[in-house]
Image (tube, rainbow, N blue to C red):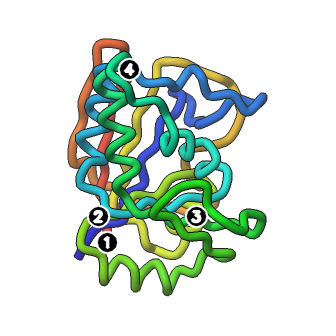
Amino acid sequence: MPKLIYSTIASLDGYVEDKQGKFGWAAPDEEVHAFVNELERPLGIYLYGRRMYETMVDWEAMDTGPGRPAVIRDYAAIWRAAEKVVYSRVLKAPDSARTRIESEFDPAAVAQLKASAKADIGIGGPGLAAAAFAAGLIDELGLFLVPVIVGSGKPALPDGGRIELELLDERRFGNGTVYLRYRVAA
């Protein structure tokens, strides 16, 4: 069965945004971006909360002309090719192709989606991922730790419960970012 994979970029102290809601410090360099592209290339579907979708939807209309870096052109093609499901009570229509809006996160519907998917599914956004973790739907966690401490902000990982993990892979990048890939233990 395809896996549901939560992948996120976080500060060393575990935040995806600082207390001002900024995340420019998390922008991947070319080496990290190329690695992310290879991880996300096989995904067939992305699940997003509204805020994550509003951040990612820029890839739909991004300039991918020859003047843009190859990693940017590549990721735009990967993102545009995937189906997207956005969970939002606010959005009524998507701003991207291959996208549908769902008003509520329904764990049973996501389990059914996993069972019928032909490829792995990515989930983006810590709030949505927390709901999926709580429902026991997440199979893997990919965590990119950026060498910065932001002090406070939006946590990358859910709190309020223990989740056992098994380390599957790790990688260190030239800019000091570290990638950790875990399987959620049964």
Q: Position of residue 162 (x, y in %)?
A: 51, 61
Give the residue displayed 65% in from the left and 23% down from the top: 150
Question: Callout 3: helix, strand or loop?
Answer: strand
Residue labelled with disc 1: 186
Residue reaching furthest front? 65
Give the residue displayed 62% in from the left and 28% down from the top: 23
Q: Earlier in the sequence, mark 1 or mark 4?
A: 4
Q: Position of residue 146 (x, y in %)?
A: 46, 24
Q: Position of residue 60 (x, y in %)?
A: 49, 45
Residue reaching furthest top? 174
At label 2, which amino acid type do we have?
Asp
Residue labelled with disc 3: 86
Q: CA distance from mark 3 to mark 1?
A: 27 Å
Name the mark nearer the viewer: 2 or 4: 4
Q: Residues within 10 Å of mark 4 (few under 14, many from 20)?
A: few
Residue labelled with disc 2: 120
Q: How many marks?
A: 4
